[in-house]
Image: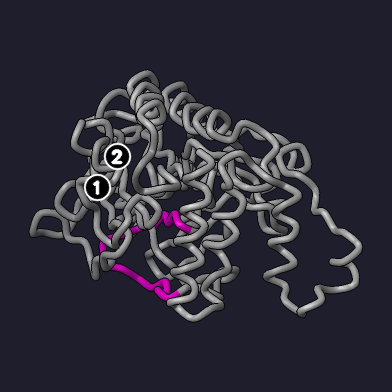
């Protein structure tokens, strides 16, 4: 059994080779450094790192240098088989296919896919811990009983990448938190902001938030990139971030645990993102009444070499149009950005 001092959950790195719209910095380098920091911190504090999905922002066609950097980072700071699940950005379809970049990492043994059948098991300061997972697009388990008998673990944690209906995410949440017998804590990725934990009888639901900020928004401005650590109460080395309330809970086996939030080093929002540009025409309102056109006008003033700002904006907004129109807009945008790369 692996011996650790706690668990460390990494939310949504969204690594890619392009710079998202409105970012001032070298996003590919900054994002991989944040991912490396998480693994390095876990090693220094003897915590087991676990990835909550969306390692990649784009499911396919990631350059070889990015895959090489990810493999080197995992190998240097963790070793093989980093426990993980895949998220919606990791796959082009709702299930993982061989051509998805994350499949290379699973096939090469750099990532280890957690599931109901394949679980991480170890000892955390003398306590037996089990961690399973459910990938994007699959149903959460109704219960966990171990290998055909009630689990004797002191803690059963489950990682997910889903739309969980919790305060602060009502607009998109679909899965209501509830008691899942045998599972003490569910740590969810996918949601790009940290939200308050939810207690549902013996199952506690945590929303990690992402470690990288991609969008220029009020939510992103308020977000503190952090990792979630679950440790026994006597772990003095993992210091909770002062701006986030720690969360204590008791497992269904009656064992006390603490959830602590550790800040990932990052720059201030205004140092990372360009400011919002408003020209005279926008102050008066777009002539045709279209906010969509007004926002596209602003994008022309914040160009990136890759056109990443355009793609990001379209992905977030084309749903307002007819499906055929939306598909044609995205096709034309892909043609334009491909021609500039």
Q: Locate residue 339 relative to residue 294 in the image: left or right.
A: left
Report the residue at 49% width, 81% height from top: 322
296 left or right of 185 in image: right
The residue shown at (48%, 62%) is 330
Q: Determine which residue is flagged by label 2.
A: 83
Please state the extent of the stretch shown in magenta in the rendering.
174-190
Q: Is residue 176 magenta?
A: yes
Whether residues under marks 1 and 2 lie with C-beta atoms below 8 angstroms apart, the answer is yes
Q: Nearer the viewer, residue 32 or 142?
A: 32
SS class, disc 1: loop
User: Quadrant of residue 217 in the image?
Assistant: bottom right
Q: Look at the image and tell me in which quarter the N terminus lies.
A: top left
The type of colouring in the image is one colour
> How much space separates mark 1 and mark 2, taking CA atoms?
6 Å
How busy is the neighbourhood of tag 2: few (under 14 within 10 Å), some, or many (20 plus)? many
Q: Main secondary structure of the magenta part?
A: loop
Residue plotted at (68% across, 45% down): 303
Residue 6 on image: x %, y %: 40, 36
Query: Circle 1 is placed at which residue position?
Result: 114
Callout 2: SS: strand
Crowd band around label 1 with a 10 angstrom C-alpha radius: few (<14), some (14–19), many (20+)? many
Residue 62 visible, this orientation: yes
Q: Position of residue 233 (x, y in %)?
A: 48, 41
* Residue 185 showing in the rendered view: no
Q: Is residue 245 above or below residue 200?
A: above
Find the residue positioned furthest to the top. 76
Q: Quadrant of residue 158?
A: bottom left
| Residue at (49% x, 75% y) in the render | 325
- Pick the front one: 154 or 25: 25
Q: Position of residue 256 (x, y in %)?
A: 42, 49
Of 341 and 278, which appears nearest the observer? 341
Does residue 333 lie above or below 102 as drawn? below
């Amino acid at each position: 059994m692996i011996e650790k001092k706690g668990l460390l959950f990494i939310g949504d790195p969204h690594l890619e080779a392009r710079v998202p719209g409105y970012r001032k910095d070298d996003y590919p380098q900054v994002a991989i450094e944040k991912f490396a920091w998480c693994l390095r911190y876990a090693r220094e504090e003897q915590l087991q790192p676990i990835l909550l999905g969306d390692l990649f922002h784009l499911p396919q066609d990631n350059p070889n240098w990015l895959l090489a950097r990810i493999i080197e980072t995992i190998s240097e700071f963790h070793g093989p088989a980093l426990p993980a699940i895949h998220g919606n950005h990791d796959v082009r379809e709702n299930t993982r296919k061989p051509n998805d970049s994350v499949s290379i990492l699973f096939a090469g043994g750099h990532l280890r896919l957690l599931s109901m059948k394949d679980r991480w098991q170890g000892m955390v300061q003398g306590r037996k811990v089990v961690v399973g997972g459910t990938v994007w697009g699959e149903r959460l388990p109704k219960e966990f009983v171990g290998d055909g008998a009630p689990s004797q673990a002191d803690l059963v944690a489950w990682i997910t990448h889903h739309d969980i209906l919790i305060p602060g995410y009502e607009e998109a949440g679909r899965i209501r938190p509830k008691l899942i017998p045998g599972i003490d804590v569910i740590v969810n990725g996918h949601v790009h902001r940290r939200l308050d934990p939810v207690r549902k009888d013996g199952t506690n639901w945590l929303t990690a938030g992402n470690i990288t900020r991609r969008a220029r928004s009020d939510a992103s401005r308020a977000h503190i990139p952090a990792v979630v650590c679950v440790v026994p109460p006597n772990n003095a080395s993992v210091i909770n971030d002062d701006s986030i309330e720690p969360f204590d809970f008791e497992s269904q086996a009656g064992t006390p645990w603490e959830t602590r939030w550790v800040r990932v080093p990052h720059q201030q929002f205004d140092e990372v993102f360009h400011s919002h540009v408003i020209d005279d025409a926008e102050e008066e309102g777009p002539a045709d009444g279209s906010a969509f056109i007004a926002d596209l006008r602003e994008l022309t003033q914040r160009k990136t070499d890759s056109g990443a700002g355009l793609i990001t904006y379209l992905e977030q907004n084309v749903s307002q149009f007819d499906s055929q129109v939306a598909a044609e807009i995205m096709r034309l945008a892909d043609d334009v950005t491909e021609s500039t790369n």
